[in-house]
Amino acid sequence: MSSPSDPASLRALTDNPFHVLGLSTDAPRAAVEREGRKLLDMLDLGVARAAEYTTPLGPRPRTAERVRWALSELRDPRKRALHEAWGALGADLLGGEGLEAELPPCPEAFAITGLGRSR
Amino acid sequence: MNPIPLFWLAYVLFRLLTGAGRAPTEKPASAADTLRGLWLVLSVGAGGVAAGLAVYRAAPGELAALGPSVGLALLATALLSPWTFARWVWIPLGLPRVARALLYLHPGVGDRRDPHGAAALAAALATLRLRAPSARDLAYLERAIAACERLRGSGVVAAGLTAALRGDAAATRRMFAGLAALPPETVPRTAFDAAFAWRAADLASRGEWGELARWRGLVDGSAGPYALAARARLACAVAAYRREYDRLAPFHVTPPHWLPRLRVFFRALGECHEDLLRDRWERIERLTGLTLRARAMPASVRFLVRVAERLAGAPTSPSPRLLWLSWALVPSRRAALPLLRRALAAEPPRPTPPPLDSAHPDPWVRGLDALTRAIAPRCAHRAYYLHRAARAWDQAFTEGAMESVAAAMEGGHEPDARISPALYGQATELLANLLLAHELPISTLAEGGLVSDEASELARERLIEDVSELAKALGGGAKAPASAPAAEHWAAFCRLVQANERAATLGGPLVRRLVWGDVHRGVGVLAVDLFNVRKERTLAHGMFVWLLKQATELEDQAAITLESKNVRAGLW
């Protein structure tokens, strides 16, 4: 399930059924059904590693409802074709090139300016 | 001879003389205020002199006789300079009620125009020092702000700090950014400094060092709009340049108590008065050579900005010696030491590699590749990659391809999923959303492609919708009951100003023009109501000045005439 902060149009990236099921876009119908059933069983048993799936915008929580929705979307050939188009945008494609350096914040800043207590 | 009485007398005279200086637009203080202040100063001053004389007459070597004199001197200083005592004693101790009460009791010598606001601000600053402010403390602060008969700079800053204490930092950011719209003479230095320090601390606490490093011009060497306009206006007043003085009226600035370099200024004035109206501050600064040294900025802000320059690897990165010096001037040196060490140990950031392009033959896949890079959390070339994604999809969704899809659907055939209308809709929606989410201008996308044009149009519509909704809500706010807190109206106005600026920055002049009608109507209705009905004239004046500036920039003659009249109505 997408995060509540995801705008509707970004859901093409976060709610893609292939991401929800953790499959590649060329997965055959039988593999989709098998993976879906497996995930539903794992979620039912509370297996921790089934509780999240990766998306290009970071991990999102996986629920049984979301898995059932993904299965139904991929059973419709027309919808599946649409999801395949976006499914190629995988989290594994996110490269490290051209990233800005990350600068850690300073939680003491308010104490330094006299607008808060030092921790 | 005992020097205490002499120092004392000099101090009392200094307070009286500086207290007499008043901005030309201010209404004189009421007789009661003047009498109260004069009585306080004279009585305490006379008491001090008497005590000093008594000590002077005491026999040499009787040091014990100095005790009452010193005690009285301290008491008089506390009474004469309530802000000084609040700043160094009551606020650091976290005593909001004491700080507020003492400032409130001395309207004659505190912030004479806004004693309630000054008292509320002191209380807010003291509450920030509490370990865990309770709901009761926050309710007390809100009562202190509500006690302000007319909300001015101090009250607005107090309201902003209260919002921060309640956890609504976004509202505080908006209110402090909107502080520039208030006439500067209504924002005392203490309030301005508190807001400035909060904004710097907020950026540092979020790790926005790059943004903070850009403040360098404000803290070191450059003047910023306020000081430049103040100097310009003062120069015009001194030289009886009536026309220029009037043209600077929209800025409504108070000349500072020192003279600018008039000779340099006059030489450049003829060239730059149009620029003053159009906010071309860099050009004015270059023409006039006017600068404001860093002395006015709090030392802690200067320190944070220098650290930010160092951490962000700015070309103006300070030397270790300058960092140590900046740290030494910070009052909270102990709290600042870890940050100083971090800045000293900072390595220059690695240069960002150039962007990469995919050479895949399928334009849809090329677009996906660019999009993948564009949505990476710390992408340094986000605008470039979004542009490339849109260009690639423009090639995928050509008019010919879309027509063939339509023909296939009409003929009952299955169209190519890669160019289906559903995918086209999702792609344009996604691009528009990413542009706005990452605050990128619409012009990032090239013109002339189906996807780029549609995404630009969607983003533009959203920007216009956001501003129009806020403007309509603001106009509706005028119908709110008179008891509605003035700070809420000001916060709503600041929100609209922010949305309008965002729309203008991202959408360009076209969007700015399209929203201007709604913005003018919404702000105008509220400002007139605040001015005429609620008598919140400082806030209303700030809104009129902002409207006039917008109208001037958009060259809306009817609005310029109307808002010029409103601005001339003044503050009182």
Image (cartoon, coloured by chain):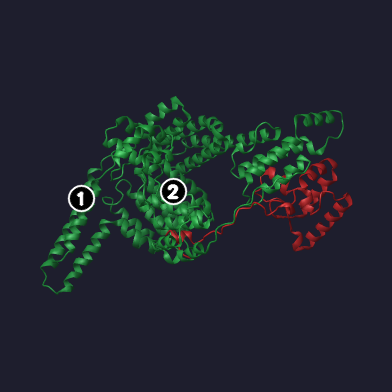
Chain colours: A red, B green
The residue to which callout 2 is attached is B217
Q: Of callouts 2 and 1, which one flags the residue occurring earlier in the amino acid sequence? A: 1
Label ID, residue B110? none
Q: Secondary structure at mark 1?
A: helix
- Say which chain tag 2 marks: B
The residue to which callout 1 is attached is B38
The answer to whether residue B59 of the structure is visible from this angle is: yes
Residue B233's spot in the image, x, y percent? Answer: 32, 37
The answer to whether residue B482 of the structure is visible from this angle is: no
Give the quadrant of residue B399: top right
Q: Report the Cα–Cα distance between label 2 and label 1.
A: 41 Å
Q: Is residue A63 left or right of residue B132?
A: right
Q: Observer-nearest residue: A59 or B146?
A: A59
Q: Is residue B262 above or below residue B173?
A: above
Give the quadrant of residue B547: top left
Q: Is residue B382 left or right of residue B336?
A: right
Q: Is residue B549 above or below residue B5?
A: above
Residue B465's spot in the image, x, y percent? Answer: 58, 35
Residue that lies at the very extreme toward the right in this rendered image: A30
- Say which chain tag 1 marks: B
Q: Residue at x 28, y 50 (%)?
A: B107
